[in-house]
Image (cartoon, rainbow, N blue to C red):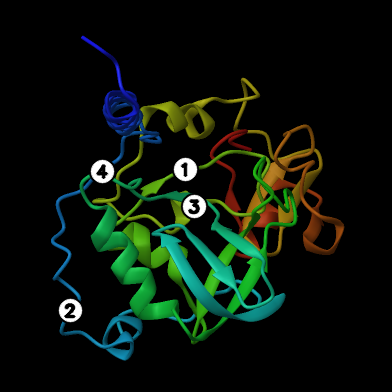
Amino acid sequence: MKITKKHIFSLLIILIIAISAVSMASAYKGTGFSHNIPSSKYHDMSSSDILGNYKKTSCHVEETGVCTKVVDGDTIYLDNGEKIRFVGVNTPERGVEGYIASKNFVQKLCLNKKVGIDVDDAKHTDKYGRTLGVVIVDGKNVNEMLLKEGLAEVMYIPPSEFYPYDWADSSTHIPNSYNTYTHTSDTSSSSSDSGSYIGNSNTGKFHESSCRWGQSISEHNKVSFKNRNDAISQGYQPCKVCNP
């Protein structure tokens, strides 16, 4: 059979389709987190309805911008071109169940609206160059909402200024791969009332001076205590890593 240009063109089309199919099958799925919340759940709710269910956050707005694009449930673009990655949370990737619901939720709250960002002082950007931070709308923490609505899982990767376990509730998904950060102790003793302790005025947590997370606290958030009782009496909670 004589091979013509038409045959070659047809073969190229078939090859392109085959490669695309393989690429889709092996597409990045992140941690594999998914949820079965229907994409229509928030369809008839206004952003005010959703925001009204949450209290004001203790996070501080460090920069502002208008959200011009929602990539997925944990990544947005601002009008200055900055790409923001919601710190401490992870939502379903494209093609994974729950992707649309999580994305729609963030679109309703953020798209074409002015949002505030509390940038992670311990680690400003991720390996993709995205700014890590808490997204704040009307004084409310959207990262926290995603966790409590079941639209995201905890993704705590130290060093981080923020401790997303504090935003979670009993129904929040916490993957085993991240549990080591909350259950591993750096010390064998937790009953001592002597020694120096370091507090984080932003998170309300305190640490032993030797704790690696305490040492990563930015200077303007750092508070010193003479002993454990001093920290507790001032309303600080013990770190779940070093367990002071």
* Location of the N terminus (image quadrant): top left
Separation of residues labelled 2 and 3 (CA atoms): 27 Å
Q: Secondary structure at mark 2?
A: loop
Q: Secondary structure at mark 4?
A: loop
The picture places residue 224, in percent across and down from the top left corner, at 82, 54
What residue did someone put label 2 on? 43
Q: Nearer the viewer, residue 108 or 22?
A: 22
Q: Which comes before the other along the chain, label 1 or label 4?
A: 4
Q: Residues within 10 Å of mark 4 (few under 14, many from 20)?
A: some
Separation of residues labelled 4 and 2 (CA atoms): 20 Å
On the question of residue 178 being in view, the answer is yes
What residue did someone put label 3 on? 164
What residue did someone put label 4 on? 96
Identity, as a three-letter code, of the amino acid under mark 1 = Met
The picture places residue 81, in percent across and down from the top left corner, at 67, 69
Q: Evaluate if marks 3 and 1 touch, with contact meaning CB atoms under 8 Å apart.
A: yes
Separation of residues labelled 3 and 1 (CA atoms): 8 Å
Left or right of residue 140, residue 109 in this image: left
What residue did someone put label 1 on? 155
Q: Evaluate if marks 2 and 1 touch, with contact meaning CB atoms under 8 Å apart.
A: no
Separation of residues labelled 2 and 1 (CA atoms): 27 Å
